[in-house]
Amino acid sequence: MGRAQAGAAHVIGLRRLYCNRNGVFLMVDVPAADVKPKKAELILKGWLIEDDILV
């Protein structure tokens, strides 16, 4: 049937953070294990985390 795309293995276990700061949008893909520290880092830099989804 269908084959997985070559890059598909690279996104397994990732979380995507949708961030906003002063009207600027930032999308960050982070390994699931690193979500909490990355969120803390972004918040300290003034980013608002609007959403966090499994990729």
Image (tube, grey):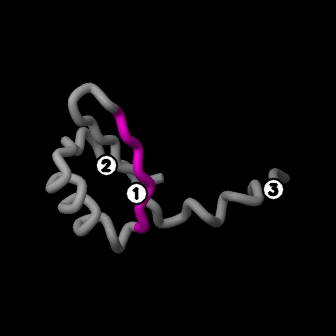
Q: Which mark is residue 28?
A: none
Label 2: how many residues lie within 10 Å, few (<14), some (14-19) or many (20+)? some
Q: Where does label 1 land, which residue? A: 15
Label 3: how many residues lie within 10 Å, few (<14), some (14-19) or many (20+)? few
Q: Residue at x 28, y 63 (%)?
A: 38
Label pair 3/2, CB-CB below 8 angstroms: no
Extent of the magenta region: 25-31
Residue sitting nearer the eye, 22 or 35: 22
Q: Where does label 2 land, which residue? A: 52
Q: Residue at x 19, y 41 (%)?
A: 48
Q: Residue 28 colored magenta?
A: yes
Helix, strand or loop under label 2:
strand
Q: Where does label 3 land, which residue? A: 3
Residue 1 in the image, given as x and y percentages of width and height: 84, 53
**Quarter location, residue 23:** top left
Helix, strand or loop under label 3:
loop
* Secondary structure that dominates the magenta span: strand
